[in-house]
Amino acid sequence: MPQRRKAMKVLIQDRQNLVRLDQKIIRRLARTILGELNQLDKEIGIVFVDDQQIRELNQRYLKRDRPTNVISFPMAQGEFPEINPQLLGDVVISVETAVREAEESGLSFEEEVAFLLIHGILHLTGYDHTGGGRPRMAVVQEALFNKLGLTGEKEAEDPL
């Protein structure tokens, strides 16, 4: 009997009231991104918040007192990655910032969320856009964006 591959778990929490989100589409998008990154047996959490909530997280964990578009909390890195090796971590997206940035960049809101999700998941899998990692991450990010059938061009917010 063939062994069945464990399905990726994508847990979604919607803690904002600005935009109605289609969790089915977001879950499918996240699974596609994870599949493209050969992370088929991993699980992630995606949390949608407003600017105030992401500002609090940014201040508490990154010591930056401002809202941002996306923050990743990797679990597979750090001191004890072997405790729960299938858990990649959480991606937190500010819907309020995503709406604003979509308008500024000419992307649809859905494209912006897809971009931020790609960006966040790349961080969970070890990519970094500081120093020498920036060009490599940008190439992978753009390739995933295009592979998903999204055509807009977008650069990640500079974390500094």
Image (cartoon, rainbow, N blue to C red):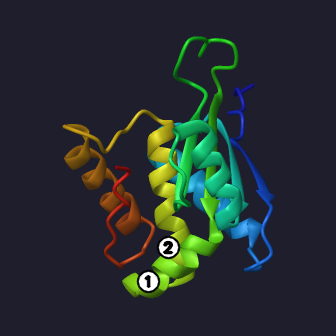
Task: Identify the residue at image location x=51%, y=47%.
Answer: 121
Residue 78 versus residue 129 in the image, above or below: above
Residue sitting at x 28%, y 54%:
138
Give the left or right position of residue 49, taking residue 13 as reference: left
Res 5 label: none
Q: Which quarter of the image is occupied by the N terminus? A: top right
Residue visible at 75% across and 66% down? 23
In this rendering, would 77 be left or right of 151?
A: right
Which sits earlier in the primary sequence, circle 2 or circle 1? 1
Callouts 2 and 1 close, C-beta under 8 Å: yes
Mark 1: which amino acid?
Leu
Q: Secondary structure at mark 2?
A: helix
Q: Which residue is mark 1?
A: 107
Q: Amino acid at mark 2?
A: Glu
Q: Position of residue 82 (x, y in %)?
A: 62, 12
Q: Position of residue 135 (x, y in %)?
A: 20, 48
Residue 21 vs residue 135: left or right? right
> Mark 2 highlights which residue?
112
* In the image, residue 4 above or below residue 148: above
User: Quick check: 156 above or below 83?
Assistant: below
Image coordinates of residue 123 in percent, x first then y, are: 46, 41
Q: Separation of disc 2 and disc 1 at Cα?
A: 6 Å
